[in-house]
Image (tube, rainbow, N blue to C red):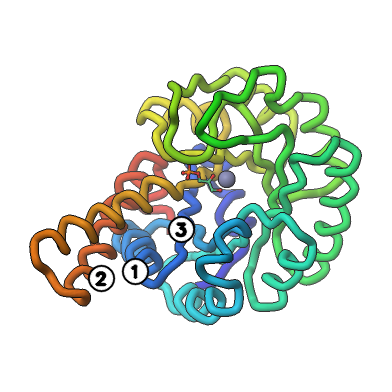
């Protein structure tokens, strides 16, 4: 069934587990992630990010993912991840996404604040939830210097003023395959979690250790974003099966199965199994 972030993250925050966002940019990935959620009776968040729209656009994605989300036997949030433009955020909402991220984290604090507040007011009037980011989670190349991590007072002011439904914070993770060993600032997560009501989000989940996930969730993370790991699992299955002489339809099945397995591993670590 299609739900918003509130239906899955408020319980996760209360009961100290995390719900995974798994970006699903094609049918094989969507089938794999939803099969994992149904088998483990886990709530799940699917969707795509604005930087991935050149591979599969919002219209096609919503036509594919919305019926799949509605039909699923577990709660599914259809979330537009890292929306960068007001135009695409509003388009995602018009197409039926139940949740959006408006990522203005590269702007200054005041600009981020007012841009996100406007989108929160717009989205909430339509029953859609909003995630925002304070501090900035970068790419895999370099670790973000700790002085660019989320500031505690800014996070509090931002969450209270905007009324955002989830807040992504910068605490030492980066997007993509890490080229350095991530060192998470668990203490900062704990402090921010104690100061604000909105559930906290950890981006750049691929490549973190099992212990990182456990400690981040214990400290107060309620949503963890994963893309690279299921991407790699999908691609490896395609490669291995093609190399073994399998045809296209067999390769498609193997891709979904690999995504399902990789997703299930994360759900078990996040503790979202049995929560649907
Ligand atoms: P990874 O690709 O590093 O897992 O990051 C996912 C993410 O944060 C999507 O928003
Ligand atoms: Zn992200």
Between residue 108 and residue 223, name the one nearer to us: 108
| Residue closer to the observer: 188 or 92 | 92
In the image, ligand 2 is in what quadrant? top right
Specify whether tag 2 is near ligand 1 (CB below 8 Å). no
Percent of width and height locating residue 76: 50, 65
Could you tell me residue 248's position as x and y percent? 21, 74
Give the residue at mark 2.
252
Upstream in sequence: badge 1 or badge 2: 1
Q: Disc number at residue 43?
A: 3
Q: Quadrant of the C terminus?
A: bottom left
Residue 209 locus on image (x, y percent)? 37, 29
Classify residue 210 by image quadrant: top left
Circle 1 SS class: helix
| Residue at mark 3 to residue at mark 2: CA–CA distance | 25 Å
Q: Give the mark nearer the N terminus: 1 vs 3.
A: 1
Residue drawn at the location 65% of the way across and 18% of the way down: 146
Q: Residues within 10 Å of mark 1 (few under 14, many from 20)?
A: many
Q: Look at 53% across and 63% down and name the residue there.
A: 47
Q: Which corner quadrant of the image does residue 167 belong to? A: top right
Q: Which mark is residue 28?
A: 1
Question: Of the residues under marks 3 and 2, which one precedes in the sequence?
Answer: 3
CB atoms of marks 3 and 2 within 8 Å: no
């Amino acid at each position: 069934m299609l739900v918003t972030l509130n239906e899955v993250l408020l319980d996760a925050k209360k009961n100290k587990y995390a719900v995974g966002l798994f970006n699903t940019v094609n049918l094989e990935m969507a089938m794999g992630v939803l099969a994992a959620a149904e088998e483990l009776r886990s709530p799940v968040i699917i969707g795509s990010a604005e930087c991935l729209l050149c591979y599969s656009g919002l219209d096609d994605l919503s036509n594919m993912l919305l019926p799949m989300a509605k039909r699923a036997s577990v709660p599914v949030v259809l979330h537009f991840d890292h929306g960068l433009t007001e135009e695409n955020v509003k388009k995602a909402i018009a197409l039926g996404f139940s949740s959006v991220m408006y990522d203005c984290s590269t702007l200054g604090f005041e600009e981020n604040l007012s841009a996100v507040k406007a989108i929160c007011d717009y989205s909430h009037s339509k029953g859609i939830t909003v995630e925002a980011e304070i501090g900035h989670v970068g790419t895999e190349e370099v670790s973000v210097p700790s002085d660019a991590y989320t500031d505690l007072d800014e996070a509090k002011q931002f969450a209270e003023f905007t009324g955002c439904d989830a807040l992504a914070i910068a605490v030492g993770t980066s997007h993509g395959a890490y080229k350095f060993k991530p060192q998470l600032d668990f203490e900062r997560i704990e402090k921010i979690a104690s100061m604000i009501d909105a559930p906290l989000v950890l981006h750049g989940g691929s490549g973190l250790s099992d212990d990182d996930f456990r400690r981040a969730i214990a400290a107060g993370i309620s949503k963890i974003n994963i893309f690279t790991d299921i991407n790699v699992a999908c691609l490896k299955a395609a490669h291995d099966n093609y190399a073994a002489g399998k045809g296209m339809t067999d390769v498609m099945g193997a891709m979904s199965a690999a995504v399902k397995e990789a997703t299930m591993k994360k759900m078990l670590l996040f503790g979202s199994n049995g929560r649907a």
